Amino acid sequence: MDYYESEKEQLEAIKSWWKDNGRVVVVGLVLGLGGIFGWTTWQGYAKAQAEKASITYEQLVNWASAQDYERADELAEVLMRDYPNSAYAALGSLIRANSAVAQGRLDEARGYLRWALDNARQPALKHLATLRLARLAYDQADFEGALALLDAGGPGTLGAAFEEARGDIMAAQRRVDEAQRHYRQAMDDPRLSPTSRERLSMKLDDLGVAVAAQEQP
């Protein structure tokens, strides 16, 4: 299952999400700390905490992109330990799962994804964690478990990715008609990137299905 074909593509997806949502996350983090101190003291404390978490996250992304897994894991642990209720922590856990997969530590990766799913407050991050848990189950030929995760997760903006994942599961079981249906449903998503559309076309080709009529201009 290759919705994300490489760790680099996964990291780029996470960074893209952060670019679109980071300001909202920082505001949420600040507001979430509002009840701890008096107004003036709280403002200074909240700003400092948000800045620390932001800096730590930026460093984490850089080390993960450089495939320095040890350093990336250390920074992810800081976010998960010190800012567990923020999106920084959930993002760190997702990146930490990437590192574990790259090193063949699949049980650890599953644990980090579960942590993100249980602790993330942002639906987009929960959906991403669910998708990647399903991918791990698929990779271990646990097709029923993968489908159960996808059916329970609710795709949100990742609808095409969830449909592609279902198609991969059906294709692996040689359930060609069902795989075709899910791949076509994924291709109907107007938000689908050209790269994803091309990949889905190739998968349909592998099933012996013509897709020229579905290509977008």
Image (cartoon, grey):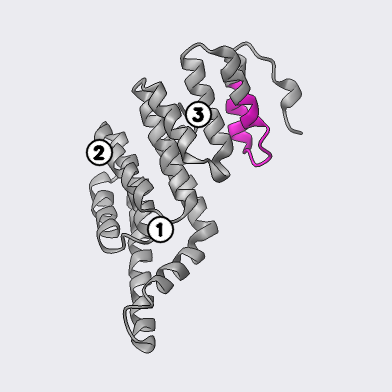
User: What crowding class fits label 3: few (fewer than 14 Cα within 10 Å), some (14-19), or many (20 or more)?
Assistant: many
Q: Is residue 116 visible?
A: yes
20, 151: nearer the viewer: 151
Q: Please identify the residue farthest to the bottom as the structure is shown.
A: 40
Q: Which residue is mark 3?
A: 165
Q: Which residue is mark 1?
A: 87
Residue at the spot 51% in from the left edge and 16% down from the top edge = 171
Q: Earlier in the sequence, mark 2 or mark 3?
A: 2
Residue at the spot 52% in from the left edge and 59% down from the top edge = 21
- Marks 1 and 2 sit apart, C-alpha to C-alpha, by 20 Å
User: What crowding class fits label 1: few (fewer than 14 Cα within 10 Å), some (14-19), or many (20 or more)?
Assistant: many
State yes or no: discs 2 and 3 in contact (Cβ < 8 Å). no
Indicate the amino acid at tag 2: Glu
- Marks 1 and 3 sit apart, C-alpha to C-alpha, by 25 Å
Q: Is residue 12 visible?
A: no
20, 127: nearer the viewer: 127
Image coords of residue 147 (percent x, y): 45, 27
Q: Which residues make up the magenta segment?
A: 183-202
